[in-house]
């Protein structure tokens, strides 16, 4: 769980939970950096048990619900 904001008296935010794997990056990344993250995600998923693998992994910008890219685990490269 993330730490509550220091200025918030109560942390009552409801978080959308998605079953599976997702990646959060601190800021908007360029295409080259997103491809590096995608390659790392594919490598990590290749090491998992086949029954636990996911088809696609979203890359989110920070704590927002904005998806910068979807990583297709079974693609050889790209996003």
Image (spheres, rainbow, N blue to C red):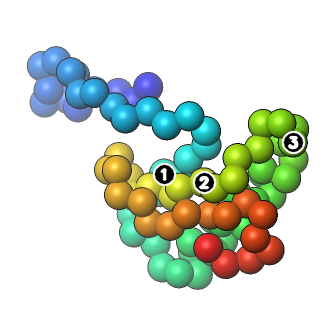
The answer to which image quadrant residue 51 occupies is top right
Q: Could you tell whether 9 is left or right of 72 in the image? A: left
Nearer-the-camera pick, 74 or 48: 74
Q: Residues within 10 Å of mark 2 (few under 14, many from 20)?
A: many
For residue 48, above or below residue 27: above
Q: What residue sits right under mark 2 in the picture?
A: 57
- Kindly report the distance in space between the C-alpha atoms of the residues bearing marks 2 and 1: 11 Å
Q: Could you tell whether 30 is left or right of 75 in the image? A: left
Quarter occupied by the N terminus = top left
For residue 39, above or below residue 9: below
- Kindly report the distance in space between the C-alpha atoms of the residues bearing marks 3 and 1: 23 Å
- Kindly report the distance in space between the C-alpha atoms of the residues bearing marks 3 and 2: 15 Å
Front of the two marks 3 and 1: 3
Q: Secondary structure at mark 3?
A: helix
Q: Secondary structure at mark 1?
A: strand
First-in-chain label (2 vs 1): 1
First-in-chain label (3 vs 1): 1
Residue at the image position 61 percent from the left and 39 percent from the top: 20
Q: Is residue 73 visible?
A: yes
Front of the two marks 2 and 1: 2
Where is residue 60? Give x, y as percent: 44, 55
Q: Secondary structure at mark 2?
A: strand
For residue 65, above or below residue 52: below
The answer to which image quadrant residue 15 occupies is top left
Q: What residue sits right under mark 1 in the picture?
A: 24
Q: What residue sits right under mark 3 in the picture?
A: 50
Residue at the image position 23 percent from the left and 28 percent from the top: 13
Residue 74 has which mark? none
Where is residue 28? Give x, y as percent: 39, 69
Where is residue 31? Give x, y as percent: 53, 81
């Amino acid at each position: 769980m993330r730490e509550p904001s220091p200025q918030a008296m109560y942390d009552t935010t409801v978080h959308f939970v998605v079953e599976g794997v997702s990646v959060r990056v601190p800021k908007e990344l360029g295409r080259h950096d997103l491809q590096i993250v995608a390659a790392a995600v594919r490598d990590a998923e290749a090491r998992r048990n086949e029954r636990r693998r996911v088809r696609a992994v979203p890359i989110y910008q920070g704590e927002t619900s904005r998806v910068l890219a979807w990583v297709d685990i079974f693609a050889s490269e790209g996003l």
